[in-house]
Amino acid sequence: MNEQQMGPFEVESDCLTLVNTLRQQRVDLTELGAVCEAILQAEGVEDCYAWKHTHREANTVAHTLAHVQVDLNHCNSWIGISPSFLLNDLYLDSSHLA
């Protein structure tokens, strides 16, 4: 299988508790701890240079992508182009940056 290398990246979430736990790389016996452990052990996560908190109203793209049905047998990437189903959400998110 041929995989593209993306290089360093950052991860944003609207769950402040999750972001803080991942920043500290703290894993415990709670359900959140189990989720964080799975995230921290995922392949490629070592390239993550920042865990960032963002407010939900400025994160509509992430929510749209989370609800898109994913076929685990295929990898989708949109490098340099935005998928048409995200254009409205990209506009809404960018309006929160000003």
Image (tube, grey):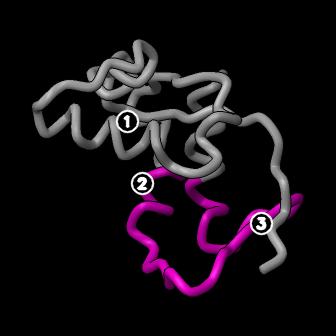
Of mark 2 and mark 1, the one earlier in the sequence is 1
User: Could you tell me how far apart the alpha carbons at marks 2 and 1 are, in whole angstroms?
Assistant: 9 Å
Residue 90 on image: x %, y % = 64, 51
Image height check: is 54 above or below 85?
above
Q: How many marks?
A: 3
Please name the amino acid that badge 3 sits on: Trp
Q: Find disc 1 in the rendering and name its residue.
A: 56
Of mark 3 and mark 1, the one earlier in the sequence is 1
Image height check: is 73 above or below 84?
below
Q: Residue at x 64, y 47 (%)?
A: 44
Q: Find disc 3 in the rendering and name its residue.
A: 78
**In the image, residue 46 lies in the stretch drawn in magenta:** no
Residue 98 on image: x %, y % = 66, 21
- Is 25 on the left or on the right of 30, as rendered? right
Secondary structure of the residue carrying numbered label 2: helix
Q: Quadrant of the N terminus?
A: bottom right
Q: Are marks 2 and 1 in contact (CB under 8 Å)?
A: yes
Q: Which residue occupies the foreground of this view, 52 or 29?
A: 29
Question: Mark 3: few, some, or many residues within 10 Å (few <14, many ≥20)?
Answer: few
Q: Find disc 2 in the rendering and name its residue.
A: 63
User: Could you tell me how far apart the alpha carbons at marks 3 and 1 are, in whole angstroms?
Assistant: 23 Å
Please name the amino acid that badge 2 sits on: His
**In the image, residue 86 lies in the stretch drawn in magenta:** yes
Please name the amino acid that badge 1 sits on: Arg
